[in-house]
Image: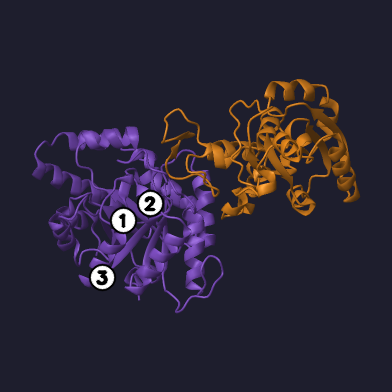
Chain colours: A purple, B orange
Amino acid sequence: MSLLKEKLEAGEFTVTGEIGPPKGIDTHEMAEEIEHLRGKVVAVNVTDIQSAVMRLGSLIVSEHLIREGIEPIFQITCRDRNRLALQTELISAAWVGIENVLALTGDHQALGDHPDAMGVFDLDSVSLLQTITMLMDGKDLAGNDLEGTPTFFPGACVSPGLDPVEPQLLKMEKKIDAGARFFQTQAVYDPKQMEDFMRQAEQFRVPVLAGIVVLKSAGMARFMNNFVAGVFVPDHLIKEIAKYKKLKDQKKKGAEIAGRLIREMKHCCQGAHIMPLGWTDTIDDILAHAEIA
Amino acid sequence: MLVTEEKPLAEVLDRMAGQDAIFIVGCQGCPMGWETGGPEKVAALGASLEGEGKQVVGTCMIDFLCNKALVALKLKRKLAALKQADAILVVSCGVGVQATAAMVDLPCHPALNTISSSGHQGLWPSEERCGQCGECVLSLTGGICPITTCAKSMLNGPCGGSHKGFCEVEPERPCGWYRIYDRLKEQGRLDQLKKLPHIRDFRKMDIPLKQRGSIRWALEVED
């Protein structure tokens, strides 16, 4: 039984974390990140070939988390696999006890480290959610019976900062109709933006976890503002983090900002999804500043 | 030559639900060669529509519907009839449907599915492209093709990589889905998006052997 599902259905403010598998087979840093998050968050997302940069697989790392006693949220994207491979990965995940699945279309391959690759996109996030729903009904996408019925807790993402936001809401509704039971958002740095978004999204009655990317430096903030669609770091936050040049101080400040954002947004959403991008050792600080009982 | 086949009348009528006054535009290029279009087909389609309770307010044959300038020039002479129309039925490939939709602010419906371009004789497109998917959805997308305008050829709306109307893959590339959204919003037809078929049938791109060659090739074989 998915603890994430249990907490969200009980209406508890729920915090999830995230790890990115390494590019290679040296997993000692990932092992440290896992230890930092152990017991601090309800479940941990495992990214799937994040940003279209080839790396260790999300299914195998999600299974590793299960063996480590940590609940994974298995991210799966449509960029690299057709409907046969996607369904195979999904039932494989169910077989090893993975229930939480975050269904994504995936970043375009042109943005990653193999821009010359063919993008598959046989399905997209909406049709992938439909597929998960069919598998949960004991059928594959072609309507054939499965031997044994997998259990999933399907989720999806939404980007409150995109302008205009109405197409995002239309698509969010499609994702819910297709089976999404929870949402994690793209990084949000403006509580007002989240509030405005939730005012329009709360009609759907599906839990939304606000995306929190720990701010590491002014350079990172500017990079996101220029190159990451739908992410906007306000000037006052850039100035706040720019004062600190030492790693230790940046971590302290980044955690304070992340915690503060959660504290300021928790009245309008059902949880927070913390993406520490390697800075998992800031999790205690973040949670303390967030004042989550 | 673009290879097309006729859509079932039931699908065409379903897409036109609520639109009673129809103007028909036909291409005299490739569909003539494939006998999926041309004046006779357009007349027959008109009769079928009227048999189903629609009113055909006018028709127009254009040599190459892929040529937007020609489309604008020809349709200008039909403005009176177009003003009475609720929608346009376009008997051409996907490029022609998009070219018509770009020139006239009315819902445009394809009468045909485009399944292949074997050679490009007569094809004179501007920015409109046809992906030859074999299950044309232009009725539901404001006459803008999501297969060829979206970098991921997505059928269910924009991804998270689209911002202020542009695609993150190429900074100056307009996001096809925002164009579709804008046009449908202008037309008050955003509800169309919910009708989209969510999952493609890629078999429809696999062209039957008899449709692989051009007519010229077929003549050569018969000789």
Q: Which residue is mark 2?
A: A185
Q: Amino acid at mark 2?
A: Thr
Q: Residues within 10 Å of mark 1 (few under 14, many from 20)?
A: many
Give the mark nearest the N terminus, 3 or 1. Answer: 3
Q: Can you say which quadrant of the picture contains the N terminus of chain A? A: bottom left
State the separation of the CA atoms marked 3 and 2.
24 Å
**Residue B198 in view:** yes
How far across and how far down the image is residue A289, in percent? 20, 54
How far across and how far down the image is residue A149, in percent? 45, 77
A33 or A110, nearer to the observer: A110
Q: Amino acid at mark 3?
A: Ile
Q: Is residue A178 above or below residue A121?
A: below
A278 or A120, nearer to the observer: A120
Q: Amino acid at mark 1?
A: His
Determine contact: label 1, label 2, CB under 8 Å.
Answer: yes
On whether disc 1 and disc 2 are found on a single subunit, the reply is: yes
Q: Chain of mark 2?
A: A
Quadrant location of residue A209? bottom left
On whether disc 3 and disc 2 are found on a single subunit, the reply is: yes
Quadrant location of residue B212? top right
Left or right: A266 with respect to A180? left
Give the mark nearest the N terminus, 3 or 2. Answer: 3
B61 or B202, nearer to the observer: B202
Question: Residue at image x 44%, y 37%?
Answer: B163
Q: Which residue is mark 1?
A: A273
Q: Is residue B101 above or below residue B135?
A: above
How far across and how far down the image is residue B33, in percent? 76, 35
Q: Which residue is mark 3?
A: A66
Secondary element at tag 2:
strand
